[in-house]
Image: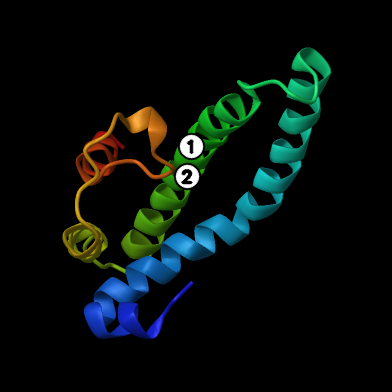
Amino acid sequence: MVTDALVRLASEEELLAVLAHEAGHARHRHPLQMMVRGHALAVATRLIGGHDNPLQSVTESLVGNAYSRAFEHQADREALAVLRRLNRTPAPFFSILDKLERQQGKADVPSFLLTHPSNPERQARAAGS
């Protein structure tokens, strides 16, 4: 999603990087996959633990976060590949992530509780690919 606030915050190159990332989510059908996996996980946890299982939401959240982070890495790879094909540097991709993190404040929680990888994790993965 591109908001007015994002447009005001980002340079044109950063917006290109964000759009390439979001196109990666669409190309790989991440929203549909999250919906299907979420429903399947909900059914499985109910079958195993019943309807009043106190661990159900925790389990669903942790597994959902793991899928979400994997999808973010895939969309990151897609964005960086698009930028390379356009002969653009990946720097704007990471600079907009840094701007967003500064604006939202850095989460000081373990990564398995987050839906998105940290910026340093994203940069390390990009450097290794």
- Can residue 11 be seen in this snapshot? no
The kind of residue tagged 1 is: Ala
Horizontally, residue 88 falls left or right of residue 44, namely left
Residue 118 in the image, given as x and y percentages of width and height: 27, 42
Residue 59 in the image, given as x and y percentages of width and height: 58, 24
Label of residue 74 in the image: 2
Q: Residue at x 28, y 43 (%)?
A: 122
Label of residue 108 in the image: none
Horizontally, residue 6 falls left or right of residue 95, namely right
Is there CB contact under 8 Å for labels 2 and 1?
yes
Q: Residue at x 49, y 71 (%)?
A: 1
Secondary-structure class at tag 1:
helix
Mark 1 surroundings within 10 Å by alpha-carbon count, few (fewer than 14), some (14 through 19), many (20 or more): some
Secondary-structure class at tag 2:
helix
Horizontally, residue 69 falls left or right of residue 8, namely right
The kind of residue tagged 2 is: Gln
Residue 58 in the image, given as x and y percentages of width and height: 55, 27
Relative vertical location of residue 112 with respect to residue 86 in this rendering, above or below:
above
User: Hey, which quadrant is residue 11 in on the image?
Assistant: bottom left
Relative vertical location of residue 77 with respect to residue 94 in this rendering, above or below:
above
Residue 76 in the image, given as x and y percentages of width and height: 39, 50
Number of numbered callouts drawn: 2
User: CA separation, marks 2 and 1?
Assistant: 6 Å
Horizontally, residue 93 falls left or right of residue 68, namely left
Residue hosting label 1: 70
- Can residue 46 be seen in this snapshot? yes
